[in-house]
Image (tube, helix red, strand yellow):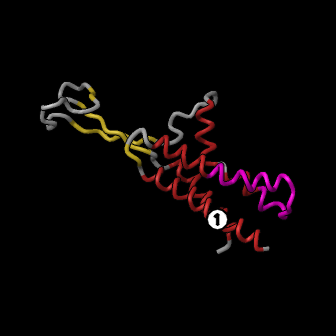
Amino acid sequence: MNIARIKLIAAAVLLACLALPEYTCSRYVGPDGKEVATGPAGVPTTPYTEIHEKHYPLESFSVRDPASWLTLLAFAWPWPILAYWLRKKRGRGTFDRLVLVAEPLLSIGSGYLVWLASSLGTRAAGAYLAMAANAAYLCAWAAELRARRKA
């Protein structure tokens, strides 16, 4: 499997993580119907019903909110770069070097944003998969850099 395919698969997995829960939270509903974050201290939690909420990356997306666009960028950043690399023959121009330097920074930044957002609750499968996809992309970038230096 070549490096471009590994990058494509990692980018597709990262984009698919938008549809997976990033973190979960638990809350309790008492017998009187009031919601509480945790059961009262010293009181048995049997009359309280535990409810698990799943939170998705774009569940509160707003076009006017810059943080929403940053979240979308954290999951979709590889696609413009891959479109550039797959469309163009690789050269040694200034823009090519800029893109080559930007790739690991974007991958690390994306992983950090996913880790930071998922720390609001208990991390779910989407966060772990997104961090793994970023790590795979970063490893493919390192392999590509090594292959370029040998050539």
Q: Quadrant of the C terminus?
A: bottom right
> Residue visible at 66% across and 68% down?
143
Residue at which label 1 appears: 140
- Residue 128 percent location from the top left of the image: 46, 54
- Left or right of 74? Residue 80 is right
- Residue 97 percent location from the top left of the image: 80, 55
| Circle 1 residues within 10 Å: few <14, some 14–19, many ≥20 | some
- Left or right of 12? Residue 27 is left
> Residue visible at 60% across and 60% down?
10
- Left or right of 29? Residue 72 is right
> Residue visible at 52% across and 58% down?
132
Q: Quadrant of the N terminus?
A: bottom right
In the rendered structure, does residue 99 fall within the stretch colored magenta? yes
Please say if 5 is above or below 81: below
Please say if 27 is above or below 129: above
Q: In which quarter of the image is residue 100?
A: bottom right
Which span of residues is magenta-colored?
84-107
The tally of labels here is 1
Please say if 6 is above or below 40: below
Q: Give amino acid for label 1.
A: Ala
- Left or right of 34? Residue 123 is right
Q: Seen from this angle, which residue lies furthest front?
A: 149
- Residue 108 percent location from the top left of the image: 60, 50
Disc 1 element: helix
- Residue 30 percent location from the top left of the image: 20, 29
Magenta stretch prevailing secondary structure: helix
| Front position in the image: 130 or 31 | 130
> Residue visible at 59% across and 31% down?
62
